[in-house]
Amino acid sequence: MKNMNQLMKQAKKMQEEMMKAQEALGEKTVEGSAGGGAVTVVANGHKQIQSVVIRPEAVDPDDVEMLQDLVLTAVNDALKKVDDLVAGELSKYTRGFNMPGLF
C-alpha cells in the first residue's frame, strides 16, 4: 500500500508539471512559411495562428489560387512545427510511460 501511495504522489506531481508545461506552450511560437518566405505564418503552442504575413510579390490578381496554396502550405507548416514542439516538450514528462491513446 505504501508503494501505491508513493506512485499516486508521483503521478500527481507529473500531472501538475505537464499542466504547467501545456500552459507555457501558449507562450511559445513557431513560424511556418511557403514560397521561399513569400507567406509566413506564426502560431503558438496551442495551435492558435498569431499572424499571417504575405509579401507583396506573392500577390498576383491573375493567380489567386497560387496565393491560397501558399497560405495553406504555410499554415500547415506552422501547425506541424507546433506538433513537434508539443511532442518535444511533453516527452520530458512521458518518458518511460507507454500508454496507448494518451501519449
Image (cartoon, rainbow, N blue to C red):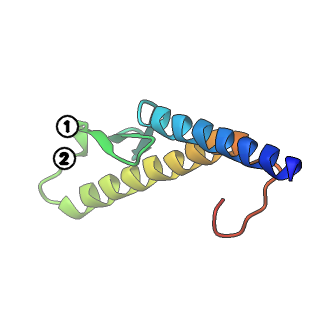
Which residue lies under the disc numbered 2? 59
For the residue pair 9 and 2, the one nearer the viewer reads as 2
Q: 62 and 33: which one is in front?
A: 33
Residue 100, placed above or below residue 37: below
The answer to whether residue 97 is above or below residue 30 is below
The image shows residue 60 at horizontal and vertical percentages of: 17, 51
**From where the camera sits, is residue 100 visible?**
yes
* Depth order, front residue of 59/22: 22
- Quick one: quadrant of the C terminus? bottom right
Determine the residue located farthest toward the bottom in the rendered image. Answer: 101
In this view, the residue in front, 5 or 81, is 5
Check the image and report above or below for 77 versus 27.
below
Question: Element at badge 2?
Answer: loop
Residue at (41% x, 45% y) in the render: 46
Please give left or right for residue 47 compared with residue 64 in the image. right
Q: Percent x, y for residue 90?
A: 63, 44
Residue located 19% across and 47% down the image: 59
Marks 1/2: CA distance? 5 Å
Name the element at disc 1: helix
Which amino acid lies under the numbered mark 1 shown in the image of this protein?
Pro
Horizontal side of 53 relative to 35 (left or right) equals: left
Q: In this view, does 36 lie to the left or right of 81?
A: left
Snapshot quadrant of residue 85: top right
Label 1 sits on residue: 56
Give the residue type that dot 2 points to: Val
Tag 1–tag 2 contact (CB < 8 Å): yes
Residue 88 seen anywhere in this rendered image of the structure: no
